[in-house]
Image (spheres, rainbow, N blue to C red):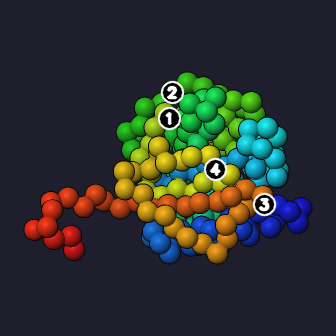
Amino acid sequence: MQEQKNWQTSLRTCLEALRKAAPLDQRHLLVVGASTSEVVGKKIGTTGSADAAAALFEELQVFSKETGVSLAFQGCEHINRALVIDRKTAEKKGLAEVSVIPHGKAGGAMVTHAYHHLEDPVIVEHVQADAGIDIGDTFIGMHLKHVAVPVRCEVTSIGEAHVTMARTRPKLIGGERATYS
């Protein structure tokens, strides 16, 4: 139980750093990639942990409720990194639903937990998120808007999993005569 609390504390610190770098609210989407295998100290994709998934999901839900940000949980390569997202968010963002049911061997523990615990989950193939957190080097970049900016934090791991974060910004276009702010 203490281990799960430690994971949640580390995740909370990361999410606070992300919130400072990118003031997320109900207009925004946060993509979450998480290898629970890595969190518990194993190689990605080998030992999914329901306990780690539950602990991380709980903390992410708290963050979502506090900020209003919508969450998208990225699955593993066995479901082509499709994402679990709430139906209302998918409809609001105009995202097309695809058919797959994630499980421990195709999707991973985190996305499977999200699928079974979101109010009305659907699977979508692609998103363009405003920010992201990658727990265990799951490679969330394909689901971020085009200009991603790294976000640094004093916490560099959750459990044994390396953690990175990013926010996005609009592209700067127009050249030397352009004004940006």
Q: Give the alpha-carbon distance from disc 1 to disc 3, as whole Å.
A: 28 Å
Where is residue 171 shown, x and y percent of the image? 28, 57
Task: Tell which tag, 4 or 1, sits nearer the viewer.
Answer: 4
Q: Whole-Å distance between the Cαs marked 3 and 4?
A: 13 Å
Please report the residue visible at 24 percent of the width from the left and 61 percent of the height from the top: 172
Q: Nearer the viewer, mark 1 or mark 3?
A: 3
Q: Circle 1 sits in a helix, a strand or a loop, which is it? A: strand
Foreground mark, 2 or 4, reads: 4
Query: How far, Cα to Cα, is label 4 from label 1?
Result: 21 Å
Q: Position of residue 146 (x, y in %)?
A: 36, 51
Residue position marked by numbered label 3 in the rendering: 159
> How many other residues sit within 10 Å of disc 4, few (<14), some (14-19) or many (≥20)?
some
Disc on the earlier residue, 3 or 2? 2
User: Which quarter of the rendered picture does the C terminus lie within?
Assistant: bottom left
Of the residues shown, which amino acid type is indicated by label 1?
Val
Q: Which mark is residue 137?
A: 4
What residue sits right under mark 1 in the picture?
124
As drawn, the residue found furthest toward the top would be 99
- Name the mark on residue 91: none
Q: Which residue is mark 2?
A: 98
Tell me which label, 2 or 4, sits earlier in the chain. Answer: 2
Q: CA distance from mark 3 to mark 2?
A: 32 Å
Is 12 left, or right, of 20 in this rendering? right
Callout 2 crowding tier (Cα within 10 Å): few <14, some 14–19, many ≥20: few
In three-dimensional space, the C-alpha distance between marks 2 and 1, rounded to whole angstroms, equals: 5 Å
- SS type, badge 2: strand
Q: Is residue 26 above or below residue 21?
A: above
